[in-house]
Image (cartoon, rainbow, N blue to C red):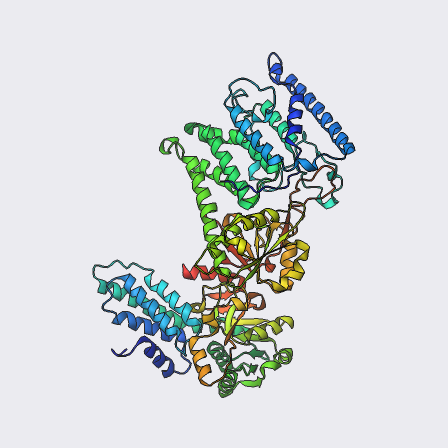
């Protein structure tokens, strides 16, 4: 299951979104009796209108002093509502819903047919060149330092919706699951290295169910392409996602004749992948991490995910006497993910008895004298032995090194990347910012491998120079 | 092995019988004898249990060191990694024993292999710093002396057992130009040397080594003064452990049980460990019988060995 932690999302309130949808014209009237080119032109016109309206709205809001602050807490519940609405509307066979959720376009709406074949962008590991029709929404782009200008600014819901429209209009079918996933990714609701990969697996499963088995090798690529393009436009892919895509392509390619395969062979393979490479790997990694944490240890954590939480659970629930483990939890703006983790700790029966210190990242040097070890989670291992991890990790690893504190990094074996990175600039992601903020919300940074004492993978505890090669 | 002799006694006897006997060699000989004598064991699992039991016993000997742990594990893996399905268990036992003897002969050859690889590193005028007493390093230097190479050695005294003095005597007996320095003098002595040569009691998965106390200090100073540190270690010393720092080193490796016993006997309340862990960033190269490896490659080699 996806592990979604509530975040302070910078999205607009649900009400505003729905308002926007009501303004746009239903597409049904445009479909009869006009050529494709004309329809496309009309569509583009509509988009321009929408964009102008949005800009106007932004200016109005700035003048009103920004009414976005209070609406953040209502967003998760609105999202849930929107999600349930989407699934309800999928079942409708009526042409187009005129109100609320245009996002719920299911594959039944667009006429089935061939789609234009495009290069599988999935195999590229860098962020794709920005599509012409999406313009950066925020003024924050102009405030980006010049060396980050090559990074794609984050997309929001309206832009994703318009991409969906574009794709649909170009007669490709977008699965609702992928739309939902893209929205979640764009709004940064999927935390942790594995969450996005699991989301992708789930969306793929839904997609694969719509393709009949015998047509699979022929149809899978054209079906997958527009969906993946949409997902890519939300955010560049993580290593795990790229890995899953690659494997999918391999499986389809190496598949024999459809006669020897069962009905759900591809879905089975994917489930197997998820179980082996992600879920079982987590169990092994938890055990390895537990073996490295001793009694009376003080562990420093930064941006921990559920993996570390489960490991802490293992530690405190073992035996009758609770080992004396203390935690220092560091956190940083703008997303303050540590707060959710803190709440989880405090809500747990045994872990709430564990002394926890919560501090800002910049307080690390003064807290390190008390620490036994630093536990971090990596996003990817580059080919030259560096670790790509959430921003702030490199700083922390450096400080820990200077204080001679061992630094442990948790990483799946399939998070090994064949990309060589020497700095945090050439590959990165921009996170969401509120439109009146000039924050450059960089998501990742690069930790040099020699600052890492040990890498904990499902293959065992390894030095950071030797990268574990996943089996193919 | 006589019927009354326990494995521990046999081990101690073998260690005492020969000067500079390798602990792993003695251990393997003991284990082979244990397999031979274990008539009541009728399955491979029972033999394996017996071996594990014996290893634990041997670790408690005062003549054992950290290499006994890795040697035992590797032995077990080596002898069982073959076709063991024979009609009668006695045949299986014979297969196990012959594999064991194979392993033993490989260990005996490892010293020669290391020496042939390390010898080119010693030339005329080389000045070497040694720490404590290492059998492998001694053998290498004796070979170099025989090859008429003109080099100098500086040996640390290596408290608390002053094993460095014993090393000095052995070197001087071989006609090598050697001098003794205090442990505290290491920083000063490093100015006058070209390289540091060390043995190891165990090589860990991180690429670091476990060796006589004082090794970490020597390596730290050498690193600060840009003096390369070379380690000579047989592959049977590759241990599946990953210490993160000194505190994370296994108690069993840091304080062999017997060490505690002898110390408390003499009445001293000394709680100093007798080994320490040197992290891989302070080592330049490791000369092993499976090749010359940089510390970063140890993890891969170890995986290959234990597979």
Name the image quarter holding residue A266. Answer: top left
Q: Position of residue B80 (x, y in %)?
A: 32, 61
Front-lying residue, A471 or B239:
B239
Can see residue A174?
A: no
Say above or below: A184 vs B138. Answer: above
Q: Position of residue A99 (x, y in %)?
A: 61, 21
Is A467 left, or right, of A40 in this rendering? left
Give the position of the C terminus of chain B as an image quadrant.
bottom left
Name the image quarter holding residue B113. Answer: bottom left
Q: Position of residue A341 (x, y in %)?
A: 57, 48
Front-lying residue, B260 or A51:
B260
Say above or below: A94 vs B170. Answer: above
Figure label count: 0
Q: Residue at x 57, y 78 (%)?
A: B128
Q: Residue at x 47, y 64 (%)?
A: B241
Q: Position of residue A470 (x, y in %)?
A: 48, 49
Can see residue B190?
A: yes
Say above or below: B289 vs A118. Answer: below
Report the residue that reaches farthest toward the right: A63
């Amino acid at each position: 299951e996806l592990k979604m932690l509530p975040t302070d999302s910078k999205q607009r309130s649900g009400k505003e979104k729905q308002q926007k949808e009501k303004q746009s014209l239903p597409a049904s009237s445009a479909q009869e009796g006009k050529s494709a080119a004309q329809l496309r032109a009309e569509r583009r016109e509509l988009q321009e209108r929408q964009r102008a309206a949005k800009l106007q709205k932004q200016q109005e809001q700035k003048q009103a002093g920004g009414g976005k602050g209070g609406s953040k807490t209502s967003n998760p519940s609105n999202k849930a509502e929107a999600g349930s609405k989407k699934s309800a509307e999928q079942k409708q066979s009526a042409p187009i819903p005129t109100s609320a959720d245009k996002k719920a376009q299911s594959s039944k709406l667009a006429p089935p047919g061939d789609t234009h074949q495009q290069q599988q962008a999935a195999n590229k590991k860098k962020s794709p060149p920005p599509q012409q029709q999406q313009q950066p929404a925020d003024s924050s782009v102009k405030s980006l330092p010049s060396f980050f200008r090559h990074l794609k600014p984050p997309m929001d819901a309206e832009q994703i919706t318009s991409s969906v429209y574009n794709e649909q209009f170009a007669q490709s079918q977008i699965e609702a699951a992928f739309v939902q996933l893209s929205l979640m990714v764009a709004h940064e609701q999927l935390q942790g290295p594995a969450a996005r990969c699991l989301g992708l697996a789930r969306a793929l499963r839904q997609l694969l169910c719509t393709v009949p088995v015998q047509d699979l090798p022929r149809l899978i690529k054209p079906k997958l392409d527009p969906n993946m393009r949409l997902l890519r436009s939300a955010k560049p892919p993580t290593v795990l996602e790229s890995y899953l895509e690659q494997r999918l392509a391999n499986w389809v390619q190496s598949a024999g004749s459809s006669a020897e395969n069962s009905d759900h062979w591809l879905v089975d393979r994917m489930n197997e992948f998820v179980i082996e490479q992600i879920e079982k790997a987590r169990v092994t990694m938890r055990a390895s991490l537990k073996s490295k944490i001793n009694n009376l240890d003080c562990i420093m954590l930064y941006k921990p995910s559920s993996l570390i939480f489960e490991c802490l659970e293992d530690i405190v629930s073992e035996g009758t006497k609770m080992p004396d483990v203390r935690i220092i939890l560091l956190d940083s703006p703008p997303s303050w993910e540590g707060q959710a983790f803190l709440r989880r700790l405090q809500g747990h029966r045994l872990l709430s008895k564990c002394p926890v210190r919560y501090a800002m990242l910049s307080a690390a040097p003064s807290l390190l004298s008390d620490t036994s070890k630093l536990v971090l989670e990596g996003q990817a291992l580059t080919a030259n032995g560096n670790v790509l991890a959430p921003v702030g990790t490199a700083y922390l690893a450096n400080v820990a090194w200077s204080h001679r504190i061992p630094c442990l990094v948790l990483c799946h074996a399939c998070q090994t990347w064949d990309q060589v990175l020497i700095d945090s600039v050439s590959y990165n992601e921009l996170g969401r910012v509120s439109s009146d903020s000039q924050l450059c919300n960089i998501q990742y940074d690069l930790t040099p491998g020699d600052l890492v004492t040990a890498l904990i993978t499902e293959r065992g505890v390894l030095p950071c120079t030797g990268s574990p090669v996943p089996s193919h | 092995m006589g019927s009354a002799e326990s494995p521990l006694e046999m081990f101690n006897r073998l260690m005492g019988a020969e000067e500079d006997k390798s602990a792993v060699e003695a251990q393997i000989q003991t284990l082979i004898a244990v397999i031979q004598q274990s008539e009541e064991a009728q399955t491979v699992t029972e033999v394996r249990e017996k071996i594990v039991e014996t290893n634990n016993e041997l670790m408690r000997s005062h003549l054992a060191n950290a290499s006994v742990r890795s040697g035992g594990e590797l032995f077990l893996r080596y002898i069982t990694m073959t076709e063991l399905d024979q009609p009668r268990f006695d045949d299986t036992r014979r297969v196990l024993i012959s594999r064991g003897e194979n392993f033993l002969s490989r260990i005996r050859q490892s010293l020669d292999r290391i020496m042939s690889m390390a010898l080119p590193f010693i030339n005329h005028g080389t000045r070497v710093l040694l720490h404590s007493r290492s059998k492998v390093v001694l053998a290498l230097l004796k070979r170099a002396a025989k090859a008429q190479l003109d080099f100098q050695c500086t040996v640390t005294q290596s408290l608390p057992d002053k094993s460095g003095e014993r090393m000095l005597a052995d070197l001087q007996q071989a006609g090598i130009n050697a001098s003794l320095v205090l442990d505290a003098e290491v920083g000063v002595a490093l100015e006058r040397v070209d390289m540091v040569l060390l043995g190891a009691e165990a090589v860990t998965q991180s690429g670091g080594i476990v060796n006589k106390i004082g090794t970490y200090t020597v390596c730290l100073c050498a690193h600060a003064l840009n003096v390369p540190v070379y380690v000579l270690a047989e592959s049977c010393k590759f241990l599946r452990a990953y210490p993160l720092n000194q505190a994370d080193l296994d108690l069993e490796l840091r304080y062999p049980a017997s060490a505690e016993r002898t110390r408390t006997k003499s009445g001293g309340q000394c709680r100093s460990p007798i080994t320490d862990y040197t992290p891989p960033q302070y080592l330049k190269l490791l000369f092993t019988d499976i090749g010359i490896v940089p510390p970063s490659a140890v993890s891969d080699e170890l995986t290959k060995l234990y597979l």
